[in-house]
Amino acid sequence: MSDQAGGGYLTWVSRWTLVRTSVATAVAAGAGAVATSPDSSWYLSLDKPSWQPPRAAFPAVWTPIYLLIAFAGARALDGTAGDDHRRRLRRAFGINLLLNAAWTPLFFRVRSPGLAFAEIIALDASNIDLLRRAWHADRSAGVALLPYLTWTGFATALNAAIAARNPSAQAAG
């Protein structure tokens, strides 16, 4: 399933699989980027913990994580034997990206840290499931997802802290 003529890391994954996972991941990333509004008066007024990273950290962390998600997805899909298993992995990958994209509008557009927290718990569960499936298909794919799992775990704690510090911010208009 590898593209031997491609050279480099494309010998590890098929070009077509990498294109598909990259496009899907870019769509999720783009949806999140469009919905983010860290300059809104609502967001600026929230009481945030002292350990919240600076604004510039978020794109600096998410960009390589999205690249790793696309790579891991391609690696895992190429390493999965059987159409049924591959279909289940594609579904898990798609659900994960939908959950990833859904958090930002819930937090920034709906303005509900509480609802976003419930959603990110579902994303965390999906991340664990995706990592398990990827690891089973190809260990390097599983390892590539570890930063994603770690960062969303941190984001979950940050979301919980913001929700707890701002009870009146829940679904505030």
Image (spheres, helix red, strand yellow):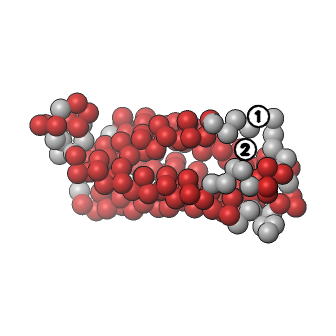
Choose between 106 and 88: the one closer to the eye: 106
Dividing the picture into quadrants, the one containing residue 40 is bottom right
Name the side, left or right, on which 71 lies relative to 49: left
Q: Is residue 69 above or below residue 143?
A: below
In the rendered structure, find residue 51 and report the number of the disc placed on it.
1
Q: Is residue 45 above or below residue 143?
A: below
Residue depicted at 42% across the width and 36% down the height = 144
Name the side, left or right, on which 128 lies relative to 173: left
Q: Please, what is the three-letter code of the amino acid marked with disc 2?
A: Leu
Dividing the picture into quadrants, the one containing residue 2 is top left
The mark nearer the N terminus, 1 or 2, is 1
Task: Give the mark count.
Answer: 2
In the rendered structure, find residue 158 and report the number of the disc placed on it.
2
Residue depicted at 16% across the width and 37% down the height = 6
Residue 21 in view: yes
Secondary-structure class at tag 1 = loop
Answer whether labels 1 and 2 touch (C-beta < 8 Å): yes
Name the side, left or right, on which 113 lies relative to 7: right
| Residue 136 x, y percent position in the rendering | 36, 44
